[in-house]
Image (tube, rainbow, N blue to C red):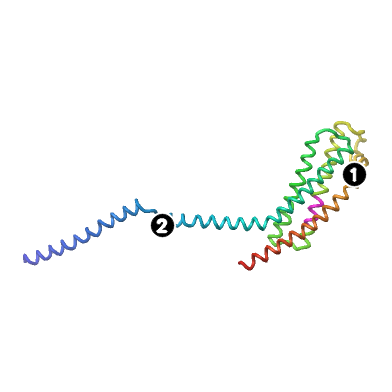
Amino acid sequence: MAALGYEAGAKLDSGVEPVGAEEAPKDVKMTAYMHGQPSPFLEDAKLRRPMIIEIIEKKYECLKKEMMPYIYHMTLIGTAAGCTGIFTNFTFRHTFKVKYDALKTYASLATVPFLSTVVAHKLLVIDALYSDNISKENCVFRSSLIGMVCGVLQPNSSAFLKNGRLATKYHTIPLPPKGRVLLHWMQLCQTQVKLMAIPLVFHIAFGVINGLHYYTVFESTLQKTVPEE
């Protein structure tokens, strides 16, 4: 019986000691891992972040290369619209004999046609091309219509009304009869209105050329991107 008790005690002792011996190093390892080593998720995030930044930079460079021809031509046609606004303002100021608020009228008639032309081309032509909603003929028509409206009609009407009001305000021309203000102004500006046919033809032709160019650039970009996908 003593031998059996001794053997049982030995077995119990042998069973307890390994458990304690195994558990102590696990706790040490866990504390060492928690305090001394970073999380694997943080390491993955640190490794992925440069890759994500590199992909974004490549996408931005590709988009910049694709948009450069559009930006150049939008700036060009917008500048032409701004120059037309300056020319019409000079013409109507000379006709109405206005010498006041020169900076105000020139600034507005240079910037508004430029911005309206650029924004209209971006929204109605380029975005429509990339959404695949317009054909080649429609692209040319929209571009020429934007050149006609934003490049000629809008600055002409704005210069006509602003300088006419200044002429009435400062009495630089004889006052028209009541109810016939626009008719009186039109009679004074008959030659200048006919002269605006020159920039009108120019902007329509320029719009047609730009519309063809936009569609050609879009087709070439589409052919480059489709095989890569």
Q: Nearer the viewer, residue 105 or 63?
A: 63
Neighbor class of circle 2 (other Cα within 10 Å; few <14, some 14-19, many 20+) is few
Q: Is residue 162 left or right of residue 229?
A: right
* Residue at the outermost bottom position: 227
Q: Is residue 41 left or right of residue 1?
A: right
Q: Position of residue 218 (x, y in %)?
A: 70, 61
Q: In the image, what residue occupies the spot 68% across and 62% down?
A: 221
Q: Nearer the viewer, residue 28 or 169?
A: 28
The CA span between labels 1 and 2 is: 76 Å
Amino acid, disc 2: Pro
Q: In the image, what residue occupies the spot 79% across and 48% down?
A: 81
Neighbor class of circle 1 (other Cα within 10 Å; few <14, some 14-19, many 20+) is some
Is 100 inside the magenta-drawn segment?
no
Q: Is residue 176 left or right of residue 36?
A: right
Look at mark 2 in the image and give the residue it sits on: 40
- Asked if marks 1 and 2 touch (Cβ < 8 Å), the reply is no
- Relative to 209, residue 162 above or below: above
Look at mark 1 in the image and give the residue it sits on: 192
Q: Secondary structure at mark 2?
A: helix
Q: Position of residue 213 (x, y in %)?
A: 75, 59
Q: Looking at the rendered structure, which numbered label has been put on residue 123?
A: none
* Residue at the outermost top position: 170
Q: Earlier in the sequence, mark 1 or mark 2?
A: 2
Q: Secondary structure at mark 1?
A: helix
Q: Indicate the quadrant containing the C terminus: top left, top right, bottom left or bottom right.
A: bottom right
Q: Which residues are magenta?
A: 142-149
Q: Nearer the viewer, residue 208 or 180?
A: 208
